[in-house]
Image: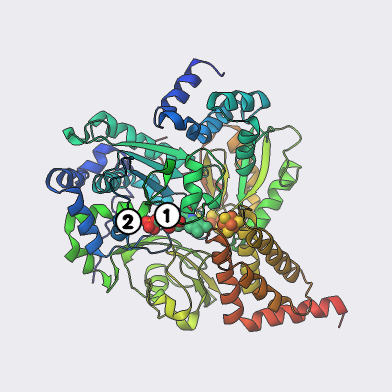
Amino acid sequence: MSYEPVLIAGCDDPDNVTLKGYEKRGGYATAKKVLKNMAPDEVVTQVKDSGLRGRGGAGFPTGLKWTFLAKDTGKPTYLAVNADESEPGTFKDRYLLERNPHQLIEGCLIAAWAIQAHDVYIYLRGEFPYGRDIVQAAIDECYEKGYLGDKVFGKDFRCNITTVLGAGAYICGEETGMLESLEGKRGHPRNKPPFPAVEGLFNCPTIINNVESLSVLVPILERGNDWFQSLGSEKNWGPKVWCVSGHVKKPGIYETALGLTINELLEEHCGGCRDGHSFKSAVPGGSSCGIVKASEFDTALDFDALREVGSSLGTGGVMAWDDTTSIPEALANFIEFYAEESCGQCTPCRQGTGWAAGILHRLVHGHYMDGDFDELERIARGFTGTTICALADAAAIPIHSYLAKFPEEFKAMAERAHALTTGA
Amino acid sequence: MYGEAFEKKLEKQESRYPEDRKRANLMAALHAVQDEVGHVPEDAIHWLAERYGISSADVQGVIRFYTMFFEDKPGEHVIWVCRTFSCELMGGAKVMAAMEKALGCKVGESDPTGTFGLRWQECLAACDKAPCALIDKDMYECLTPETVELVLEHVKNGGGGARVEGEKLVPLREGAVR
Ligand SMILES: Cc1cc2nc3c(=O)[nH]c(=O)nc-3n(C[C@H](O)[C@H](O)[C@H](O)COP(=O)(O)O)c2cc1C
Ligand code: SF4
Ligand code: FES
């Protein structure tokens, strides 16, 4: 079945970043229709019924999250857009921000109307100054045209969108770390509860959604839930943007319906493995996911199927690795990442990720000590479920998964290291 | 502090926050200061603290939390080479080594003339164009050790983001808003 992209459509056209270019392909017609014809509650209900699951990594149902908003608090409600995209292997949001900014803004308008938020903050990671300029230019055009401001589309609805640039901290992608940063503070995640929907930005009810989750609202409201649920499978519906890197012939951005297999994505879309090699494994959704062996590549890329092979969909950042790739080196690289990016509030995370990174660093540099692997797993168990945010849990996932799926590689590395140290 | 246009910019940004929450603009204000002078000097720290009714230690705490804010001049141009795995796989470490050699400094330092500061950064969200680097506000993609000198020269001459193709640098996305 041929699939018609709804998120990356227009992204190859340089004009698409301008209001004129976006409107040329029907842009803002949906938001206008929604604000004119639908009550906010109706939008919430439609998004809830669509079954859309968040595209930021956790896969939480978007409409359901919206229903958790505290009501009648007398406080304003905020929408915060997570454009912090820092999960290793993930580059879809950058693509959408730089090439399809108006669809994000249109999605923001739909969401803001649904939850009756008058202030939207788009938080972009500090490494996206170019994307921020593009999005800001698009926002400026919308103010001029009356699509943002005191009277959106001439209606009695005020909506402001503000872009905020981070400054190099993965933890500001964690939603409460992001809220702290939006308040002008260090990005220290908050203890939950209270959840942001009850007490978020400036202690007011706040919804946080990912760039792709918001962008996909436009086709959902335009085409309806039947269309949305014609893509993918039960509870794993809709379009998805994939970002593929590693040893494929054609790394890059792809959009399909959820639920194609890893094989289909890598072979049919990405041209397969580079010449002279074959795939060993892949990580389907950023570094915080379990690893999938090539023998499991017939698994569908969706939220539920990947769980069955000990992985998860995460962000859709697919890293494909061939037979030359060292799994222990991959693990060492990623754990170094978590150690570097731990915000330092929780002792198990701050210390544990550092210890684990130290052991792995030693190992890949030829020094193995008896019991290292047990120690790694013990440390990972120590920082699972014992911390303020999920960064530590995320770091534990590759440790357990890589050791379980590729024990022979770790063993071989230990033996080599042992031979090096003893001269045997 | 840095003239009228600077003050106007800050006031406009601050207008987006509730009256009693103006410190929310601290991230933007720190970026604005860095855009003016390349780092956040001590007098700016005190000035921002006063402006937002918080302590200088608080401002400093924020600066030190984020890798992209600097209390000391990092170099006129800051080079952020991606350290994370998709780039490592494609030779990121070799690119860094070539940078160190070309600049005559180690990662974490600036070159002897103060023109370039050299840093590692985590995944820059351009993994399909590995190995890559962010230099100031622009991306440099598909880097090779052989073309490092070319890239540095390009940056010194004010060139924008580019991708290495063979032995050449090709500008990114011509025609897009700049
Ligand atoms: C350590 C950590 C980093 C995260 N980084 C991001 C990120 O960069 N972008 C993102 O959208 N979500 C990120 N998340 C998930 C967010 O906390 C949040 O669930 C998401 O933005 C919600 O949006 P969604 O429901 O639309 O997916 C991160 C979570 C954790 C624990
Ligand atoms: S788990 Fe780690 S990153 Fe998260 S709050 Fe604790 S120390 Fe910070
Ligand atoms: S790993 Fe270098 S950009 Fe993602």
From the viewer's side, name the closer residue of A346 and A366.
A346
Callout 1: helix, strand or loop? loop
Residue B57 falls in which quadrant of the image?
top right
Q: Does the closest atom of ligand 1 sit within 8 Å of the Cβ of label 1?
A: no
Which disc number belongs to residue B90?
A: none
Residue B84 place in picture, x, y as percent:
59, 58
- For the rendered model, the colour scheme is rainbow
Counting labels gives 2
Residue B173, visible in the rendered structure: no
Residue B124 horizontal side relative to residue A77, left or right: right
Q: Which residue is mark 1?
A: A195
Residue at far right of view: A423
Residue at far left of view: A37
Callout 2: helix, strand or loop? loop
From the viewer's side, name the closer residue of A19 and A337.
A337
Q: Are labels 1 and 2 on one chain? A: yes
Task: Relative to B102, say whether B37 is above or below.
Answer: above
Task: Relative to A405, say whether A394 is above or below.
Answer: above
Q: Residue at x 12, y 47 (%)?
A: A37
Residue A163 place in picture, x, y as percent:
41, 38
Please, what is the three-letter code of the amino acid marked with disc 1? Phe
From the viewer's side, name the closer residue of B130 and A7.
A7
| Chain letter belonging to callout 2 | A
Task: Tell me the quarter of the image containing the C terminus of chain B.
Answer: top left
Q: Residue at x 15, y 46 (%)?
A: A33
Task: Tell me the quarter of the image containing the N terminus of chain B.
Answer: top right
User: Label 1 vs label 2: CA separation?
Assistant: 9 Å
Q: Which residue is mark 2?
A: A68
Q: Residues within 10 Å of mark 2 (few under 14, many from 20)?
A: some
